Image: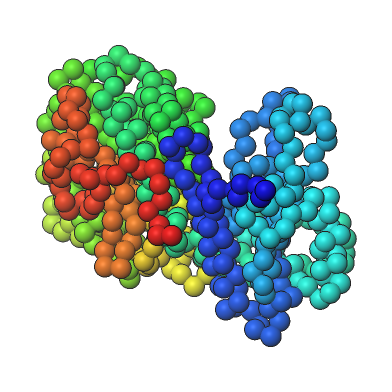
Amino acid sequence: MSSTPPPAFLSMGLSTYRVPKDLFATNRKKVVESLRGNLPPSNLDKYVIFMEGGPALMRNDTDHEPIFRQESYFHYLFGVREPDHAGLLFVGSGKSMLFAPRLPPEYATVMGEIKSNECIQNEYSVNSVCYSDEVEDTLINLCASGSIILVLEGTNSDSGNAYIPPQFKSPDIKVDKIVLFPILAECRVTKSQYELDLIRHCTEITSLAHVFTMKNMKPNMMEYQGESLFKHFAYYNFGARHVGYTSICGCGPNGAVLHYGHAGAPNDRQIQDGDMVLFDMGAEYFCYGSDVTCSFPVSSLCKFTLRQRRIYEGVLNAQREVIRMIKPGVCWVDCHKTAEMEILKVLVDLNIVVPGMSTLEDLVDNRLVGSVFMPHGLGHLIGIDTHDVGGYLPGNRHRIVQPGLKGLRTARDLKENMTLTVEPGCYFIKHLINEALKEESDFRQFLNEKVLNSFRNFGGVRLEDVIEVTKSGCVNYTICPRTIDEVEAVLSGQKWPPMKDDDPSLMRTRLVQTPSPIFSTTPK
């Protein structure tokens, strides 16, 4: 009797989302085809990609092993969950091979059953599996037959950190460190339908977790309780064990700290009645993730104050205008400047900014908003990494070194099947206000010091959605409350998702008919 075939998907069990194994096979095929278009066609069979997965790490000098999360490029190609693996991908044939660690018998006592190589082959749908201690001999034999081993080496333009290539003991292993990096990074910029489905799922469950958190926040709670509510909801209901980044849960003036929540400021302020809070959190599932920010008042009245409402509407208008203009061919820098213009309008309306003889276009161009009120980029590519790779690859626009614009994580023209965040914000950051109000500042003449100083403890507002660039526009995966009425309705306990979309311009196409975000919608 034949054994039961392995499932065609990976999941966390029960009714959690089923990630098709074909997602990784599709990624491998995409990379191979891209390499074939960039290498001499007569010699394709001699090129072999070698990739190392992430290693198992211990905390400092202890034997505590933190929860492992796979290295992103390796996950993109193979989807392997465990540490200490490596892989080969043959450019000519498209065949794949994994190398798994040869585990000692005592591993079974401490960590559980040791999987056979056949089991690993079936689990990850590769052509063959060998042991990790056979890597060097395998590569030596391949090179003896004329192969060239393509390895990854390059700098992540988002972080500035280098990807360090693998090191081999044998000089007989012929390595190319040039070809692979820009091609593999570019492949990750646009997503397959499998990836789009998974990122949408992550964004929908992230949105629902934000709504759960929003409904349960009350005055006098701690910021970290918001973080806890979010993580519990995403993990308990949808198996999302990881988050994509450190949760940012700032209230009051902490909402003006762009990456609040770190070890030195661990979401530990008590929320006062009437505080505006800025919660930036994203669930991750099988290494693909989301990144969503909600800003809302925590108030016994469940209402925005007039000031909160006006700043919020300015940021929401920025989001609306950017979403309206997104389509293939549009420059991301132009989207950023459009967001700055909308934020500038509300600052002028509140008499914080006084243009004088200058036009609003002049103030955008002289970087007032980017220097003082929105000192970050509009958004970023998103996928396996929150700040996904490919923002400044060769052949694309270079980074613009100006306030605000230098924070753009990409300056590319948009392409169909890109996934990005749209995250305009308006912040009152005390040290930037101080700099702008100095006598020698170019911006002092445009600022009403008395009104601006009255906003010093306001904090900030950021709204962040995840979008997919489509053939003719975009689709917004985020299904959070966004309009003032929607937010106040959720704060007062009303049902979400709603029966009616208050703002179709936000392109939340599945808001009122969101199916249970469990299974891939990719056709068989």
Quadrant of the drawing holding the C terminus? bottom left
Q: Position of residue 270 (x, y in %)?
A: 35, 17
The residue shown at (74%, 26%) is: 110
Q: Is residue 198 visible?
A: yes
Depth check, front residue: 240 or 320: 240
Q: Is residue 283 left or right of residue 277?
A: right
Residue 25 sits in which quadrant?
Answer: bottom right
Q: Is residue 199 visible?
A: no
* Rendered position, 167 above or below 230: below
Depth check, front residue: 367 or 59: 59
The residue shown at (81%, 56%) is: 135
* Rendered position, 458 above or below 503: above
The residue shown at (26%, 39%) is: 480
Q: Position of residue 152 (x, y in %)?
A: 66, 61
Q: Residue furthest top?
A: 220
Q: Is residue 75 left or right of residue 488?
A: right
